[in-house]
Image (cartoon, helix red, strand yellow):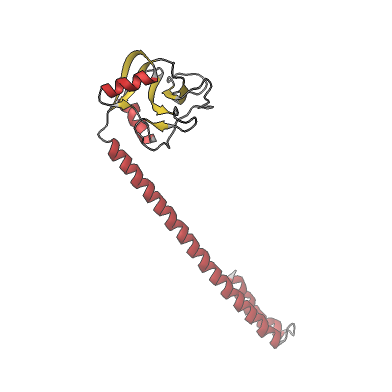
């Protein structure tokens, strides 16, 4: 835009010489053009300032997220995961057994942790209890450890509380309908052969 105004300003004397415009009009036009150039320049500076502020805020957000992830990883660095064959156990029975073993039903709070579990826990192709529940308040899921609830791996359409389902388990890897190793809510009376121990 600035280059266009510059070209027009250079051409205005030609218009005067050709008697297409008088000098007074020329000066007024040049003054208006210069004012417009100044306005555009100031607006451009404001936009650049806004862009820098947005980039600064994005950087701070990424920095905070990175620090939070590092803290989570540090917290989980010394944790281990083990699949326990309980024969046939409800979620509550699995929870109690995990505590007797000095741990708790696994809490999966990030994608990084989930990938770590896949690499180290040798998950069976079966239903597996983990440590989430909304028993206290329907729809308000919590981890047994009290860790913040944020990361989820719910299967499509879940949780649906179809039969007063308040307990969390992992679908088998080869489940149909796109449920492969996703999460599902299940009833307190349901039983699985396995649960995931974290300690």
The answer to whether residue 5 is seen in the rendering is yes
Residue visible at 37% across and 50% down?
Answer: 63
Q: Quadrant of residue 117?
A: top left
- Does residue 72 appear left or right of residue 135 in this picture? left
Please state the horizontal and vertical placement of residue 138, each as a whole percent of the image: 49, 29
| Residue 66 screen position, x and y as percent | 36, 46
Viewer-side residue, 166 vs 108? 166
Q: Quadrant of the C terminus?
A: top left
Q: Does residue 122 appear in the picture of this structure?
A: no
Residue at the limit of the structure toward the bottom, as seen here: 23
Looking at this view, is 195 or 26 the one in front?
A: 195
Q: Quadrant of the N terminus?
A: bottom right
Image quarter for residue 136? top left
View extreme (front): residue:
136
Residue under the point 34% across and 20% down: 94
Q: Pick the residue in front: 71 or 2.
A: 71
Question: Which residue is at the front of the view, 131 or 26?
Answer: 131
**Total numbered badges shown on the rendered structure:** 0
**x and y percentages locating residue 198 in the rendered image:** 30, 27
Q: Residue furthest top?
A: 87
196 relative position to 24: left or right:
left
As drawn, 157 above or below 45: above
In x, y percent, where is residue 70? 32, 43
What residue occupies the far right of the structure in this picture?
A: 20
Q: Residue at x 38, y 36 (%)?
A: 110
């Amino acid at each position: 835009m600035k280059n266009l105004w510059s070209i027009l300003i250079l051409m205005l004397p030609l218009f005067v010489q050709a008697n297409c415009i008088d000098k007074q009009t020329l000066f007024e036009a040049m003054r208006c053009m210069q004012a417009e150039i100044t306005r555009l320049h100031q607006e451009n500076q404001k936009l650049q300032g806004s862009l820098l502020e947005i980039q600064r805020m994005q950087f701070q957000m990424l920095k905070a997220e990175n620090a939070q992830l590092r803290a989570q990883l540090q917290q989980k660095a010394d944790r281990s995961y083990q699949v326990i064959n309980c024969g046939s156990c409800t979620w509550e029975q699995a929870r109690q057994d995990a505590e007797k073993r000095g741990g708790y039903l696994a809490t999966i709070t990030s994608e990084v942790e989930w990938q770590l579990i896949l690499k180290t826990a040798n998950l069976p192709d079966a239903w597996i209890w983990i440590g989430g529940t909304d028993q206290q308040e329907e729809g308000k899921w919590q981890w047994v450890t009290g860790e913040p609830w944020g990361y989820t791996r719910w299967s499509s359409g879940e949780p649906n509380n179809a039969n007063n389902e308040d307990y969390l388990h992992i679908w088998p890897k080869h489940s149909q309908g796109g449920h492969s190793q996703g999460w599902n809510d299940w009833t307190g009376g349901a039983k699985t052969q396995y649960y995931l121990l974290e300690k």
